[in-house]
Image: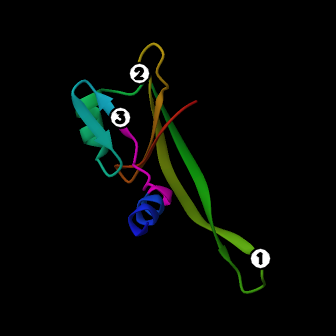
Amino acid sequence: MKRKILILLALALPVAAQADTLRCGSKLIMEGDSAGKVLERCGEPQNKQVITEPVRAATSLGGTQQVGTYTYEIWRYTRGQGKFPALLRIEGGVVKRLEYER
């Protein structure tokens, strides 16, 4: 009886989420890889989008003010017929997020 309860508990535990990977030929790309490694393994993306967002900070009067900007890139790789395109967020020359467009 104890064994059945342990098995049921183990099956009920959530499974840790695995980070997405991008396959380029026989090589894999994942979060934390450098932009140079992505270019070497996958070539130039089909589309690059540069995004600049304001960085705001609180003021002593309770409002906010812009204190700078933050820039990152979104690289889009099409992967062939029937496969969702891969979107890579590149920050500071490193893949910070890898997801698939749906």
Q: Residue at x 21, y 27 (%)?
A: 26
Residue 22's tag is 3
The residue to which callout 2 is attached is: 79
For label 1, the SS is loop
- Pinpoint residue 72: horizontal percent, then vertical percent: 48, 49
Point out the tag, 3 or 2, that comes first from the N-terminus. 3
Mark 1 or mark 3, which is nearer to you?
3
In three-dimensional space, the C-alpha distance between marks 1 and 3, rounded to whole angstroms, equals 42 Å
Pick the front one: 70 or 25:
25
For label 3, the SS is strand
- Pinpoint residue 43: horizontal percent, then vertical percent: 29, 26
Would residue 27 appear left or right of 69 to someone viewing this image? Answer: left
Q: Residue at x 32, y 52 (%)?
A: 32
Q: Residue at x 71, y 81 (%)?
A: 59
Check whether the beta carbons of the residues at disc 1 and disc 3 lie within 8 A of each other.
no
Point out the tag, 1 or 3, that comes first from the N-terminus. 3
Residues shaded magenta: 11-21
Check whether the beta carbons of the residues at disc 2 and disc 1 lie within 8 A of each other.
no
Classify 76 as above or below 89: above
The residue to which callout 1 is attached is: 63
The amino acid type, in three-letter code, at marker 2 is: Arg
Check whether the beta carbons of the residues at disc 3 and disc 2 lie within 8 A of each other.
yes
Label 3, residues with CA under 10 Å away: few <14, some 14-19, many ≥20: many
Give yes or no for residue 46 being in the magenta stretch.
no
The amino acid type, in three-letter code, at marker 3 is: Leu
- Pinpoint residue 50: horizontal percent, then vertical percent: 51, 41
Would residue 79 appear left or right of 59 to someone viewing this image? Answer: left
The amino acid type, in three-letter code, at marker 1 is: Gly
Give yes or no for residue 12 being in the magenta stretch.
yes
- Quarter of the image where the N terminus is located: bottom left
